Image (cartoon, rainbow, N blue to C red):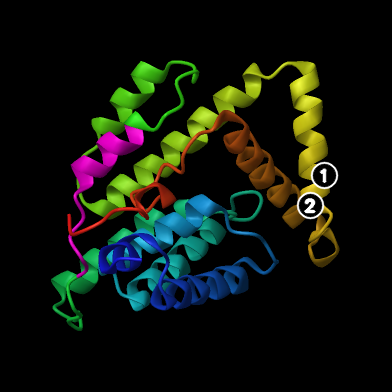
Amino acid sequence: MNETAASEGEPSAEDHAFFQAIEERFVALRGAATLLSPADWQLARAWHRAGIPLAAVLEGLERAFARHRERERPGRISSLRYCRPLVEEAWRELRELGALVRRPAAPALAVEDRLERLAAALPAGLAERRERAAAIVALAGEPAAVEARLAALEEEWLAAELVRLDERERTELEEQVTRSLAAVAGRLDAEAIAAAREQLRLRALKRRLGLPDLSLFSPLFLTDSGTE
């Protein structure tokens, strides 16, 4: 494995520690167990790689859950993406206050190149492939913002593809999800099981479609050689 792939593509021990700390605080604030989705993992990883300190992320989570309670919204927060605006707000305030502890710069990402490669990796038979590829390459901005938008696109497209399934395909998909869920169902409450079922359903659908992970840190880039 080359050094670039290890530092930019494959999850590092620091990535895992960063995500675990976020996940633990998220579950504690939520007050119930849940399975964070692959898109949540990618978003947390993008925050880490963009140099957003853990303190800012945790502060953003606190604000998001507090605001949710204040507005008396129904249900529980089930995704880090709900908290993203408050995380970014906390990070912006921390920078403005000059309280940021300097850390080594994260490796630069060739964002445009990676977006083009993600677009090219869309399967040939994917519905509206040309339009979807164009939507990917049109993204711009900081890596964290691009990563969040990629996650939103993936969620939107998978929801559309789910509707296109016929009855037989839908039955096969649900049977696959039920088998996968059986391994963890005993450790989760009813709400967490419902959330996990939805995540597993979308994950299985993505495999069925051959859709790559829409992420700047997709396994698609693990074979990169040299520096970008």
**Amino acid identity at mark 2:** Leu
Which x, y percent locates residue 90? Answer: 30, 67
Which x, y percent locates residue 42? Answer: 43, 55
Q: Residue 169 lies in what quarter of the image?
A: top right
Which element carries disc 1, helix, strand or loop? helix
Query: Please, is residue 147 above or below residue 20 in the view?
Result: above
Residue under the image location 45 percent in, 20 percent down: 124
Residue under the image location 34 percent in, 37 percent down: 118
The answer for how far apart the CA atoms under marks 2 and 1 are is 5 Å
Residue under the image location 21 percent in, 55 percent down: 109
Q: Which residues are magenta?
A: 106-119
Which x, y percent locates residue 108? Answer: 17, 60
Which quarter shows the N terminus? bottom left
> Any magenta on residue 24?
no
Which x, y percent locates residue 165? Answer: 68, 19
Query: Please, is residue 95 above or below residue 182 in the view?
Result: below
Which quarter shows the C terminus? bottom left
Q: Residues within 10 Å of mark 2 (few under 14, many from 20)?
A: some
Q: Where is mark 2, residue-wise?
A: 181
| Secondary structure, magenta segment, majority class | helix
Is label 2 in contact with label 1 (beta carbons under 8 Å)? yes
